[in-house]
Image (cartoon, rainbow, N blue to C red):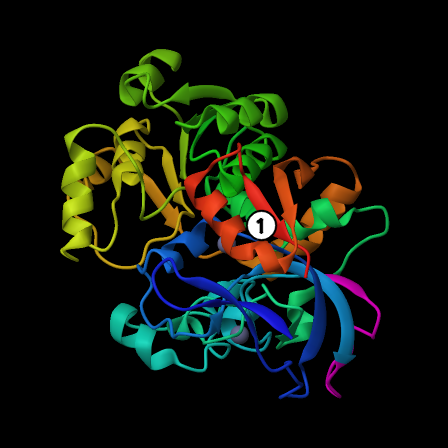
Amino acid sequence: MKALCWNGINDLRVERVPDPSILNPGDAIVRVTMSSVCGSDLHLLDGYVPTMKAGDIIGHEFMGEVVEVGPGVKKLVKGDRVVVGSVLGCGGCEFCQTDQWSLCDNSNPNPEILEKAYGYSGAGIFGYSHAFGGYAGSHAEYIRVPYADNGAFKVPEGVTDDAAVFTSDAFPTGFMAADMCGIEPGDTVVVWGAGGVGQMAMQSAWLLGAGRVIAIDRFRDRLAKAKQFAKAETLNYEEVDILEALKEMTGGRGPDRCIDAVGMEAHTTGVEQYYDKAKQTLRLQTGRPAVLRQAIMACRKGGTVSIVGVYGGLLDKFPMGAAMNKALTLRMGQMFAQKYIPQLLDRVAAGEVDPSYMLTHKWGLDHSPEGYKMFKEKTDDCMRVVFTP
Ligand SMILES: [Zn+2]
Ligand SMILES: [Zn+2]
């Protein structure tokens, strides 16, 4: 089959690879009908996620048709149209049993790498390096889905592929960001990053009772989408001082809930950007935490900072004093896909949210390297490129 393979920093190639097959009784093989790019893939392209090997298939936000099931699969049959969560969960360990699926004890067959880095390993993730399990990703014609009964969900009739594909990763991640905020009715919620996850965090903040949603980015088209589709007020950080602006907009009090939907490759203005970039390039820090610093500084006393933008390792100049002395709650994590996907599919089916507006480009797999280039450079108002293998 054809697949998009990582071959080094910013080196993606469409290659011929062997078809996947059933390895364990709980596996299913899915013919991929749609597979989307994700901001966290850019960390792979840029070489900030170690343990990638030449030939690894990337991609983790996808949907498709079940073409084969292992003997242990009970909930799926051949022909089912399914969306698959990007994070794998065994379903049986104490973390899966308590709906903390990205912390699964069993779905990462290479736990020793993350045990060294983090103390304990979390779940495996499709197409996201050998540290996260070495699972083949979804930018391919077919994919093996382990623990298929837990991770693959039938798409309700009436929900289009264009909307369903984002319930795999961007929507549950954005929803979890808002859920972790503990939003109280009327709260002001600020979202840094108006890409796919940020847009979904804004939509989710409204669903969970926010009174006001503010989006921060520098790309005009993304801010325009935040305004039009997510009914957010918008701030461009290249045009205004964010801390000043947020203080002013909240009567000097500061926003109640702050969401970092950007992560370790944050871009900022001024000397901070050069400082962070230099230290990251020299690997003196693995992330550029400009957004996280700003969110902590901006947040009102006693508020919540919720982090779903991906971080990998160490950060420099982390304002711990501000977080501690303002009694902030910090929440974070890789998303609990299996917890959120069913209810999000229901919400999409009920017409509460339509994520399909994020799909700006739809291309065949042959053009996937160009698709990533466009997504990375954010040209042509690109928000999400979806490949149709
Ligand atoms: Zn993702
Ligand atoms: Zn588990």
Instruction: Judge left or right: residue 215 versus residue 282.
Output: right
Instruction: Residue 257: tell me if it is visible.
Output: yes
Q: Nearer the viewer, residue 129 or 179?
A: 129
Instruction: Identify which residue is drawn at 35% across, 46% down.
Output: 263
Secondary structure at badge 1 equals helix
Residue 88 lies, with reference to residue 11, above or below; the image says below
Q: Amino acid at mark 1?
A: Pro
Residue 281 lies, with reference to residue 57, above or below; the image says above
Majority SS type along the magenta span: loop
Highlighted magenta segment, given as a residue range: 69-82
Instruction: Give the residue number, with chain letter if any, for mark 1.
Output: 172
Q: Is residue 280 magenta?
A: no
Instruction: Identify which residue is drawn at 54% across, 35% down.
Output: 199
Residue 117, image x and y in percent? 26, 70
Q: Quadrant of residue 292?
A: top left
Instruction: Identify which residue is drawn at 67% across, 74% down.
Output: 148
Mark 1 Cα within 10 Å, few/some/many (few <14, many 20+)?
many
Q: Nearer the viewer, residue 98 or 125?
A: 125
Residue 56, image x and y in percent? 46, 73
Residue 129, image x and y in percent? 41, 70
Instruction: Identify which residue is drawn at 74% across, 62% down.
Output: 82
Residue 335 lies, with reference to residue 112, above or below; the image says above
Where does the C terminus fall, quadrant-wise? Answer: bottom right
